[in-house]
Image (spheres, helix red, strand yellow):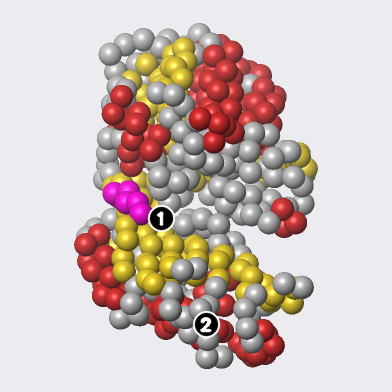
């Protein structure tokens, strides 16, 4: 058991907040190759800043392979505990939807606002400063504790794949990039494009990422008055703009598309209803609609460990080529090949071809696995929550990249999920409680 750790944890609250403000001020959105860095100059700046913060805390640090990744380590021994998080963030979207500048963090009502406060800079720093509290308390680690900083999590995971090629792998670990308590199962993550030649003459582009429900899309083509009448008839929110009609949606993470409203889907439904057709428009309107499970294509796909299949249309681009960018979260026991076959068959009826963009295999550890039981015991003891059971998720964390690894916090069970949305924010007291839980978790996992 840990004794006399509380004062050391309390001493880390202000430095944790200050470090988070520094990191959030860096707009670490992927800008591939910019400045000569793998994922752009801003992400490289965030990586170097995180390594500087860790170095100042007393960790040994390594800037990895020209900026693909970094790590910070403390302790000695042959065995290694890995803590995996990421420093890149998704784009902020429409700035007018934010109450404050997304990269100039503001504290208000006990919350820190800014892109990355929840996903994943805040949780990653909570774990880092938790280990600093253990160091200050004089704890001797029986394993090395290594923080692995990724830089490409929101896109293609090239960072963690490069790390796995080049570096030593931990024997166990966790990723502070989800909710408490323990996430023992993560669905397979399939990102793909459906493509076909554009013979329609319709031009349209919208959405910002595979893994975000698009909250608006602008249509500047023909028959705007007819479209406005149809949108009104369907009950779909929109605004007339000088340069077209903006269909309104609601942002959400692609792992929970049912909590959002897909503006692209709504536009396609309305366009088809007034007689404007294209391969992509017809496919979306007839095969997907507003169903976050795409049951017309797949039927009822679900399993006990991880729940239902999820399906998100993240982006549309109708230029010379018609292109739909899709993110699907596949239950852990469902073969990927079945999903690809059904989707390819449905798309082919509209002249669209399946093109895989990325695939992350699912994570599934039995609930009696020693990492799961250890972290659950710590969580229950130090959160006071003895009711909530281990959970499954449609999210994709670095936990699935390593053996004996799970996602663990940092959001509380009832905390509002604001990642990938305007006004992303972290509840500071919850972040400090996560730091306490992480300190005890690292202590137990290094015994």
Residue on which the image places disc 1: 394
In the displayed structure, does residue 1 sit left or right of residue 358? right
Magenta-span inclusion, residue 97: no
- The quarter in which the C terminus is drawn is top left
Question: Where, by quadrant of the figure, is residue 182 drawn?
Answer: top left
At 49% across and 13% down in the image, what residue appears?
59
Quadrant in which residue 189 is drawn: bottom left
Residue 359 colored magenta? yes
Stretch in magenta: 357-362
Q: Main secondary structure of the magenta part?
A: strand
According to the image, label 2 marks what residue? 269
- Can you say whether 417 is above or below 353 in the image? above
Q: Using the rendered image of the protein, determine whether residue 386 is visible from the camera's viewpoint.
A: no
Q: Does 362 sit left or right of 228 as displayed?
A: left
Residue displayed at 77% across by 47% down = 100
Q: Residue 74: image x %, image y %? A: 44, 14
Q: How many numbered circles does the render carry?
A: 2
């Amino acid at each position: 058991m840990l004794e006399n750790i509380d004062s050391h944890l309390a001493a880390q609250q202000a430095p944790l907040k200050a470090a988070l403000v520094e990191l959030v001020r860096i707009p670490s959105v992927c800008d591939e190759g910019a400045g000569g860095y793998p994922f752009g100059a801003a992400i490289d700046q965030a990586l170097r800043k995180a390594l500087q913060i860790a170095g100042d805390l007393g960790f040994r640090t390594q800037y990895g392979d020209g900026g693909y990744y970094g790590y910070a380590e403390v302790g000695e021994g042959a065995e290694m505990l890995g803590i995996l998080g990421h420093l890149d963030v998704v784009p902020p979207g429409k700035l007018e939807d934010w109450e404050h500048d997304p990269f100039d963090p503001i504290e208000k009502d006990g919350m820190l606002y800014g892109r990355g406060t929840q996903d994943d800079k805040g949780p990653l720093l909570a774990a880092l400063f938790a280990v600093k509290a253990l160091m200050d308390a004089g704890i001797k680690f029986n394993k090395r504790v290594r923080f692995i900083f990724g830089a490409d999590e929101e896109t293609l995971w090239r960072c963690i794949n490069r790390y796995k090629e080049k570096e030593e792998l931990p024997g166990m670990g966790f990723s502070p990039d989800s909710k408490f308590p323990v996430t023992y199962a993560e669905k397979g993550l399939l990102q793909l494009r459906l493509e076909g030649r554009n013979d329609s003459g319709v031009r349209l582009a919208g959405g910002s990422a595979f893994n975000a429900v698009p909250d608006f899309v602008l249509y500047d083509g023909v028959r705007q008055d007819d479209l406005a009448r149809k949108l009104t008839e369907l009950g779909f929110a929109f605004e007339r703009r000088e340069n077209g009609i903006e269909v309104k949606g609601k942002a959400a993470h692609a792992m929970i598309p049912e909590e959002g409203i897909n503006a692209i889907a709504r536009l396609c439904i309305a366009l088809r209803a007034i007689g404007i057709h294209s391969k992509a428009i017809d496919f979306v309107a007839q095969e997907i609609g507003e169903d976050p499970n795409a049951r017309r294509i797949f039927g009822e796909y679900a399993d006990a460990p991880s729940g239902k299949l999820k399906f998100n249309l993240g982006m549309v681009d109708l230029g010379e080529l018609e292109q739909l960018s899709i993110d699907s979260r596949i239950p852990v026991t469902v073969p990927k090949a079945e999903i690809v076959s059904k989707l390819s068959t449905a798309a082919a009826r509209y002249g669209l071809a399946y093109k895989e963009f990325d695939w992350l295999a699912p994570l599934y550890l039995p609930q009696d696995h020693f990492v799961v039981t250890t972290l659950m015991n710590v969580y229950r003891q130090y959160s006071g929550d003895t009711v909530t059971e281990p959970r499954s998720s449609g999210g994709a964390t670095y936990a699935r990249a390593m053996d004996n690894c799970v996602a663990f916090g940092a959001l509380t069970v009832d905390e509002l999920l604001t990642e990938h949305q305007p006004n992303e924010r972290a509840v500071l007291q919850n972040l400090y409680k996560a730091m306490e839980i992480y300190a005890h978790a690292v202590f137990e996992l290094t015994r």
